[in-house]
Image (cartoon, rainbow, N blue to C red):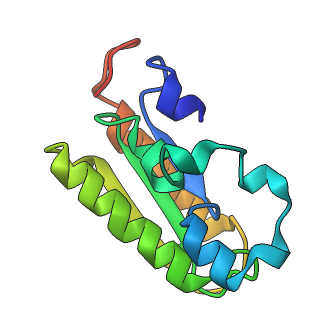
Amino acid sequence: MLYATCPLVRAAVVAGMMFTYMGQIEQGIDTHTWMVFPGEWTRHGDWPDLLAAGVPSPVLVMYNKADRLFPLPAMRAAHERLSFLYSAAGDLGAYRGEFYEGDHKFDREMQRSAFAWFDAKLKNAAPGEKE
């Protein structure tokens, strides 16, 4: 939410927590509390829509294919929605989705990718400037 609402955040990584509401409700609502379903938000959009509010700032979303907390179809739907929203904003290159084998995690492989991605995206951006 900070990424979507604060212009000082110039890039973000979301690791293991991106999905669509409908996909989660249909296949995995029992794995979560009310905190991942903020009241009234669905009137305005879905989690991918909230994340895409940060356009044109770059974002990397990391998905775990066998995540017990988020069903793969809900993650794939989020990936498709984010790809569409960034493309519609004219900056598909600012969004990257990566799918990893395994359960809910942010392991060393993912960390290396996230830090390399931050390095590439923030290296040339001036402080306080969105890329």
Q: Which residue is located at x 67 percent, y 85 percent?
A: 27
Task: Return the x and y of residue 116 as percentages of the image width and height.
Answer: 44, 51
Q: Image height check: is 8 above or below 33?
A: above
Using residue 111 as the reference point, say whether residue 33 is left or right of it: right
Whether residue 92 is visible here, answered yes or no, is no
Using residue 28 as the reference point, say whether residue 32 is left or right of it: right
Most foreground residue, 116 or 39:
39
**Residue 112 quadrant:** bottom right
Image quadrant in which the N terminus is located: top right
Q: Which residue is located at x 72 percent, y 70 percent?
A: 105
The residue lying furthest to the top in this view is 128
The residue lying furthest to the left in this view is 90
Task: Return the x and y of residue 36 as percentages of the image width and height.
Answer: 73, 55
Q: Which residue is located at x 47 percent, y 17 percent?
A: 8
Q: Image height check: is 31 above or below 54?
A: below
Task: Return the x and y of residue 84 as percentages of the image width and height.
Answer: 25, 60
Q: Image height check: is 102 above or below 77?
A: below
Q: Which residue is located at x 30 percent, y 23 percent?
A: 125
How many discs appear? 0
Whether residue 40 is visible here, answered yes or no, is yes
Task: Return the x and y of residue 30 as percentages of the image width and height.
Answer: 84, 77
Most foreground residue, 105 or 24:
24
Q: Image height check: is 64 above or below 11?
A: below
